Image (tube, rainbow, N blue to C red):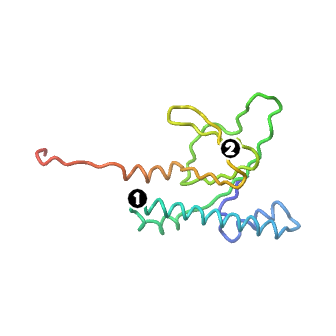
Amino acid sequence: MGISSVLDSGGMRNLANLMWPQGNPLSCETLDSYARRLSELEQLITMMVFRSLGVEKYLESHNESLSHTIRVMKYEAPMTREPQIGARSHYDKTFLTILQQNRVDGLEVQTKDGKWFQVAPSALTFIVMVGESFLVIIFSFSHAKACNSDSS
């Protein structure tokens, strides 16, 4: 399940009305607080990266362009001992993904040489993954073109 525009005033209220038509203000407030804290973490990480790249002047316009989505997924335990894939290998299209696992330990990461390893964070850990949009910014600053004065 995905909740788009979670920082907009009606984002969590719309979810609460869908999930609990009779009302559930405590859950709505908890989800809203969680979304806002994740947004603060994302902004802190982005600020550190922009500063390190020397492009801090673009930070405010970047933050204003963001729309935040929370996705909640539940993967059932496999019925057999054979490993099953909950989500295929992929790159996140987003700028950053902040992942919190809940007693699942299902995240696997592929190294540059093609090997996979399982990530088993503690219960209080958030995993921050760089998305494709973030890589565009990083790699766009890592090249230069030298001009030769003898060429026309």
| Residue 30 percent across, percent down from the top left | 76, 66
| Residue 108 percent across, percent down from the top left | 64, 39
The relative height of residue 114 versus residue 148 in the rendered view (above or below) is above
- In the picture provided, is 144 more to the left or to the right than 45? left
Badge 1 local density, few (<14 within 10 Å), some, or many (20+)? few
Q: Which residue is tagged 1?
A: 53
Q: Which residue is tagged 2?
A: 120
- In the picture provided, is 78 more to the left or to the right than 57? right
What amino acid is found at the position of numbered circle 1 in the picture?
A: Leu
- N-terminal label among 1 and 2: 1
CA–CA distance in space, label 1 to label 2: 30 Å
| Residue 29 percent across, percent down from the top left | 76, 69
The relative height of residue 124 versus residue 148 in the rendered view (above or below) is below
- Between residue 62 and residue 38, name the one nearer to us: 38
Identify which residue is drawn at 40% across, 58% down.
Answer: 53
- Between residue 47 and residue 120, name the one nearer to us: 120
Secondary element at tag 1: helix
Identify which residue is drawn at 45% across, 61% down.
Answer: 50
Q: Tell me, for residue 11, which label it has, or none.
A: none
